[in-house]
Image (cartoon, rainbow, N blue to C red):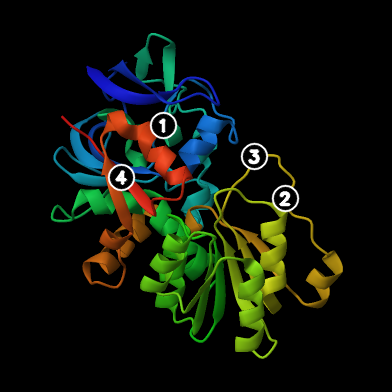
Amino acid sequence: MKTKAAVVVEAGKRIEIEELDLDGPKEGEVLIRYTHAGLCHSDIHVAHGDLEARLPMVLGHEGAGVIEEVGPGVTRVKVGDHVVCSFIPNCGSCRYCATGRQSICDMGATILEGYLPGERFPLTGPRGQYGAMCMLGTFSQYGTIHQNSAVKVDDDLPLDKAVLVGCGVPTGWGSAVNTAAVRAGDTVMVSGVGGIGINAVQGARYAGAKYVVAVDPLENKREKAMELGATHAFATAGEAIATITDLTRGQMADSAILTPDLMTAEIVGDGFNAVGKGGTVVLTGLNKLMEPNIQLPGTILTLFRKSIKGSLFGDCNPTTDIPKILGLYQSGDLKLDEIITRTYTLDEVNEGYDDLLAGKNVRGVVVHEH
């Protein structure tokens, strides 16, 4: 079948819209009609070359839609199911899934290669075989994906909101609730209030933090942070650290969650300085794969028993945490409608990312036309 898709052909160039051929589902695979896709910063890391991926690649790793067809051996979903796609597949049987660490499932090792198990490329076109970002390629009207990437959700959930729970929401929420293990009464600093950081703010608030201090140079992001749970918001880390010092009488923050668009040594250093004894610094934002961006005094790390943690997908387990987080949305404990700034058509995807990079959007969503 034919599908229209947004493709990155060469790092550093604008995203192109192409018509591609899509092969139907084989063993363990499903055909999904995407209804919505989230504009997440990780796709721009691929487009800009910060993350080296096999090209050409259909972008998009936040997706929601309806299952149209299932291949042999599919047990997780059926035709007609509404699903949210997990940007990390979860096989359920590898060492990491079996020990409750689905976010580092072995199947996720090839998400930047873009092929399905067996090095299968369902998408083809004028440039040959096309990879799909995170084995999904949600910037396409249709996709053939593995069942391990699909999580069934309630039929009455609005998919234009639920789509965000495929990546950005659990990544930020889990960075606070799981990785930082925020507890009632804690002081938390969140650096970078984009699509991930705003959910770290929500997660820290829900976990019971006494003070949630947001840092972002953009006023609209700081205002949104205050609206959704931050107690303080500042343009610079220096201002935040000074306030944290006063609020805690010098004890400093219990955790600093770093969710900038591009992780730098300065941001990591500020997070390290913001936390006190026994404090945790969570690195969730990305940079180039091998870019050295942690330069810290190891002796202080030791003497103050500070810790540095990386967080992927907020240490969430997609099969249980995607429905759990959506349940919090249904009960009004998590806000999704309020973080969507604007919607776009697939043809407007470059405009959407221009707006993201300009800081206009907290979250943008692509609405697929069929």
**Would residue 249 be seen by someone viewing this image from the given angle?**
yes
Q: Earlier in the sequence, mark 2 or mark 3?
A: 3
Quote the CA–CA distance across marks 2 and 4: 31 Å
In the picture, which quadrant includes the N terminus? top left
As helix, strand or loop, the secondary structure at mark 1 comes to loop
What is the x, y in percent for residue 241?
65, 75
Identify the mark at residue 277; answer none if there is no mark.
none
Disc 3 vs disc 1: Cβ atoms closer than 8 Å? no
Identify the mark at residue 365; answer none if there is no mark.
4
What is the x, y in percent for residue 247?
60, 87
Depth check: 155 or 10 in front? Answer: 10
Rendered residue at 29%/59% (across/down): 323
Disc 1 target residue: 59
Rendered residue at 31%/54% (across/down): 340
Quote the CA–CA distance across marks 3 and 4: 25 Å
Disc 2 target residue: 293
Rendered residue at 54%/60% (across/down): 217
What is the x, y in percent for residue 312?
53, 53
Q: Quadrant of residue 190?
A: bottom right
Mark 4 residue type: Val
Q: Could you tell whether 118 is left or right of 267 in the image? A: left
Which residue is the extreme one toward the bottom?
A: 249
Mark 3 residue type: Lys
Which residue is the extreme one toward the front?
A: 219
Mark 2 residue type: Asn
As helix, strand or loop, the secondary structure at mark 3 comes to loop
Question: Is label 3 or label 4 in front?
Answer: 4
Mark 1 residue type: Leu
Disc 3 target residue: 288
Quote the CA–CA distance across marks 2 and 3: 10 Å
As helix, strand or loop, the secondary structure at mark 2 comes to loop
